[in-house]
Amino acid sequence: MGRAFVYVILGGGVAAGYAALEFARRGGYSRGELCIISEETVAPYERPALSKGYLLPEGAARLPGFHTCVGANDELLTTKWYKEQGIELVLGTKVISADVRRKTLLTGTGETISYKTLIIATGAQALKLQEFGIQGSDASNICYLRNIDDADKLVSAMKSCPGGNAVVIGGGYIGMECAAALVTNKIRVTMVFPEKHCMGRLFTPKIAEFYENYYTSKGVTFVKGTVLTSFEKDTTGKVTAVILKDGRHLPADMVVVGIGIRANTSLFEGQLMMSMENGGIKVNGQLQTNDNSVYAVGDVAAFPIKLFDGDIRRLEHVDSARRTARHAVASILEPSKTRDIDYLPFFYSRVFTLSWQFYGDNVGEVVHFGDFTSSSPRFGAYWVNKGRIAGAFLEGGSREEYEAISIAVRRKAMVTNMGELEKQGLALAIQE
Ligand code: FDA
Ligand code: NAD
């Protein structure tokens, strides 16, 4: 049993949706030549909605409202759209092995799908507590968050314990965004993570202090510098408490775990070149792997960042997924006209009424600026590396201000005096 396509997009997440739109806009295929294979049972959607709009107590976002590409204020690609465009959606189908030399994929249902050109967009999976030696994390009230099914489990866990206690494991993006959502759903939250402060991969201690104080004012308790060791459960197998390494017992009606991700590379290990350092599939500036019929985009791809002198990075953010996907399609359809990608890394988050953006790289010396104390905060930081702006963070900015900091990073604005930079703050970017 088998089918043959010219173009196959493996994975049906954010990158797949944006790649499909780019194919449709460029018109480089005929009906039935392009397919998306996805383990998920729905068409590609904007994953960031799962930790934000999807968890709202009222007026929550639901499909089809947040299929790609609405997150970039572009067309809403429903299943009807794919049909109209002649793009085959092979949903609810897991690819279990790949043969790059033969250009075939084998699905869990035993079908062999062949391609001339493959775009790998398999994203990533949440790390599980079992990998850290914690047993019993399959209880019905322990929630991870990567896909719609996870989000539905989280929503039903929240509904089952109004006014109850949640323990959030991990102080990264999932931990911070889910803690805010839990509070909004009137659930008491304790956050547990091993680092000295939240968002350790990006925030400075001063930036983290602001968010931790804000969360504390909303009733969140922080337990830092420790990890959980086990769970206490009732006779039905539900978690009732989280036990920490320092011996503390935290009562829990539900647990949310966000302890990082692993890129879904396993189908291609031993077949394609990997970036060991970044844990992803290594690609060039055209998003092409070492096999010239295979491209990789989104969370799974480790690609060169021109702005960082060609340094290879694997980014776990939606803007990168959207742009690498579009770029790969341009490279496939118009190779001679498509230059190497020149990407400016961009991360953001929205929690409660707060909202921040970050551009570039958080390396070098840090200078903070702005008002960290007001009830409508507007503050930020520059990272200065080798006398130039390498990264910039801003909370509470306007559209123009965010654009200004992004331009300052893109231009690698020169800094001669750190004291002066601190005094100028946002004005430096705006004057640029
Ligand atoms: P993505 O994970 O979206 O899609 C991968 C797809 O491949 C899935 O459909 C999966 O089922 C499928 N797949 C994998 N293996 C397969 C196989 N063997 N066979 C078939 N299908 C397979 N970023 C940001 O910048 N701002 C934000 O606010 C957020 N918020 C956010 C919230 C939540 C809850 C999550 C989980 C993530 C975010 N992100 C984010 C990160 C962002 O969503 C992420 O970077 C993109 O979804 C990556 O897009 P990809 O298409 O690469 O992977
Ligand atoms: P993360 O890498 O942001 O944070 C992982 C956190 O896990 C660390 O901060 C650490 O506190 C914690 N941790 C690690 N090991 C631990 C252990 N043994 N016990 C307790 N805590 C431990 O990953 P995440 O928060 O799980 O997010 C998953 C993915 O989703 C990431 O790719 C992220 O970029 C993406 N995401 C992004 C956004 C956004 O960009 N706004 C929002 C949500 C999710």
Image: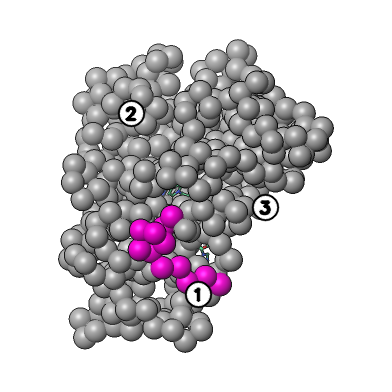
Q: Quadrant of the N terminus?
A: top left
Callout 1: CB less than 8 Å from ligand 2? yes
Residues at discs 3 and 1 in contact (Cβ within 8 Å): no
Q: Which residues are magenta?
A: 214-225
* Front position in the image: 354 or 95: 354
Report, in whole angstroms, how far the alpha carbon at label 2 lies from the one at label 1: 38 Å
Residues at discs 2 and 1 in contact (Cβ within 8 Å): no
Q: Which is more foreground, mark 3 or mark 1?
A: 1
Which of the 4 image quadrants contains residue 370? top right
User: Residue under circle 2?
Assistant: 70
Instruction: Please tell me which residue is depicted at 77% across the width and 28% down the height of the picture.
Output: 414
Of all residues, the one furthest to the front in this rendering is 374
Magenta stretch contains residue 223: yes
At mark 3, the secondary structure is: loop
Q: Quadrant of the C terminus?
A: top right
Residue type pointed to by label 3: Glu
Which of the 4 image quadrants contains residue 158? bottom left
Residue 277 bears which disc, if any? 3
Q: Residue 118, percent across and down? A: 48, 33
At mark 2, the secondary structure is: helix
Residue type pointed to by label 2: Val
Residue type pointed to by label 1: Val
Which of the two labelled residues, at mark 2 and mark 1, occupies the earlier sequence position?
Answer: 2
Report, in whole angstroms, how far the alpha carbon at label 3 lies from the one at label 2: 33 Å
